[in-house]
Amino acid sequence: MGVLVVGSVALDSIHTPHGVVQDALGGSASYFSLAARHFTPVQVVAVVGEDFPPASLALLRRCGVDTGGLAVQPGRTFRWTGEYGADLGYARTLATELNVFAGFHPALSGEQRRARTLFLANIDPELQLEVLDQAERPRLAACDTMNYWIDSKREVLLEVLRRVDVCLLNDAEARQLSGEAQLPRAARVLLEMGMKRLVIKKGEHGALYFSHDDRFFCPAFPHEQLVDPTGAGDSFAGGFLGYLDREGDAAAPPFRQAMVCGTAMASLCVEAFSPQRLAEATRSEIAERVRAVRALAHVPEIELWK
Amino acid sequence: MGVLVVGSVALDSIHTPHGVVQDALGGSASYFSLAARHFTPVQVVAVVGEDFPPASLALLRRCGVDTGGLAVQPGRTFRWTGEYGADLGYARTLATELNVFAGFHPALSGEQRRARTLFLANIDPELQLEVLDQAERPRLAACDTMNYWIDSKREVLLEVLRRVDVCLLNDAEARQLSGEAQLPRAARVLLEMGMKRLVIKKGEHGALYFSHDDRFFCPAFPHEQLVDPTGAGDSFAGGFLGYLDREGDAAAPPFRQAMVCGTAMASLCVEAFSPQRLAEATRSEIAERVRAVRALAHVPEIELWK
């Protein structure tokens, strides 16, 4: 039951115009699970080194994340160093140390294989395939990726993207993968390539949803004080899949509402460094943010010509 | 009664990856009036040269635009030449010939002074002030501008922007005028500078509305085949103000619905070169596009924790 995420648990060092953090809890699986756990039970499959701070492990557990699948291996934890410019747009990677993550091969337990919802966070698409092969027909499987895999492992990645139910990409990735500059055309091409549903994340410009029978636009929450955008995409995925998992086995999954929940969790995430806000947020704060995002684009009835 | 627009009527030569047009009907007042006239009566105040094609004048009149304020002066009509790259983003100006527009000073007739709604299209802010001084308390006045005036006539422009009820800017102009890179902060700064309501147009990313008591996001219609973006901003203004004019003297003007009507008209405009689609569109096409834009961001009720 619940959501299973396979991805990275990392130590991030981040430079923004608002400050710096060093070796803070990061990684796609951390952000995802700390967002999704507000909606539904979450299990993490990832690997860390022996240097992984006990306080970070304690934080995940205190937040109710099932860390039974978080392997500790000899060596150092995956580390990422990045910086953002004044507009807090996309991160510039200063350093990546894979460390124990270099030898990661996810092996799922029986319970993990039976997870109702599966999120393949941004890892090598060959590992994403290994997970899909182990999973026992999740009700919904989704995956993320990055430019590096689009360049280096395009064919394997395309196989993964065709097998999952929802592909989460950012705008640059959608353009790169489709070869189309305009996003509505990019989406059409990706659906024709065999993807079933697309979420295209555009940062401050919101997120788009495309399937063969629907198109939906969700605005971003208009922050006046963005602190650290790291993890926004994985927090989105956590809110999105967490909500879908919780809402049961509906024949028509509530994708629009899930986009709003994803947007709300991403908007909380970026208010502080690391997943701090995801760890601290209360149900009433989340409900209020979900309400605010939904209200942003609400339009009363329009009467034109009677 | 109705809307009065003061702006340019021009002959445009436009290069896009989809083709080229030469000396086609253009100018802010043309696009605005051909969009707004679907909703409410429109009068144009502008100037053209003796070379202005009779067919273009006939088009405006056939569409019901009141061209009584379109002066014909000795000399050539204002001409603009621009080109768009593969992504059909912002235009690159190749040539501007002001011609008779260089000596333009709008003089409003009695009927024009009493227009219920006033749109100051992108012209010299000193001329915009001249119009505001002649107008007799319109119910709603709005204005547009461009980077050139922000650079060269900032103080006069700020006086105009403070006097009107709604300022329409694109994202780059909002950043330039406010000195803030993030749009929600830019909007806050502009409201603090004395503007009453802001519409920030972001092209394919939609449009934002900010006032002291509301924030609204309207998505763009996701075109798969954008032909020519010229005039999209003025078409937006035409749909926006046309709808507001038609909806009577409500104490709470329906700005959200007006944003949807503006978006719908802009999306029709960009489907062909010049204002051709604005001239041809039927009420049922417009109603269908308004419905489609409104549906794009509609979110059913979200139940979180009972």
Image (cartoon, coloured by chain):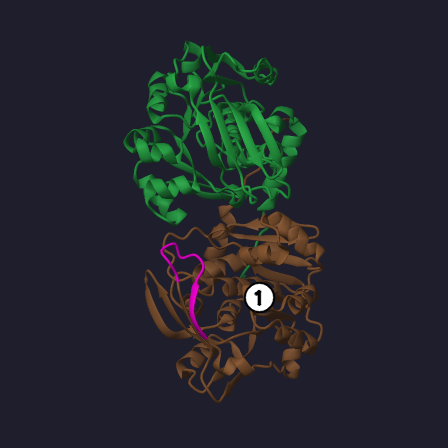
Chain colours: A brown, B green
| Helix, strand or loop status at disc 1 | loop
Residue where numbered disc 1 is placed: A145
Question: Would residue A92 be counted in the magenta stretch?
Answer: yes
Residue at x 52%, y 80% (from the top left corner): A101
Q: Would residue B211 be visible to someone looking at this image?
A: no
Residue furthest to the left: B155
Q: Would residue A61 be visible to someone looking at this image?
A: yes
Left or right of residue B304, residue A228 in this image: left
Q: Magenta stretch mostly in which secondary structure?
A: loop
How many callouts does the rendering have? 1
Give the residues in magenta.
A84-96
Instruction: Indicate the position of residue B31 as horizontal and vertical percent values.
Output: 53, 26
Q: Residues within 10 Å of mark 1 (few under 14, many from 20)?
A: many
Q: Please name whichever residue, A210 or B151, is drawn nearer the observer in this view of the structure.
A: B151
Instruction: Indicate the position of residue B146 as horizontal and vertical percent values.
Output: 40, 33
- Determine the image quadrant of residue B171: top left
Q: Chain of mark 1?
A: A
Residue furthest to the front: B94
Relative to A53, residue A200 above or below: above
Instruction: Indicate the position of residue A221 as horizontal and vertical percent values.
Output: 46, 52
Relative to A44, residue B46 above or below: above
Residue at x 51%, y 52% (from the top left corner): A206
Relative to A150, residue B45 above or below: above
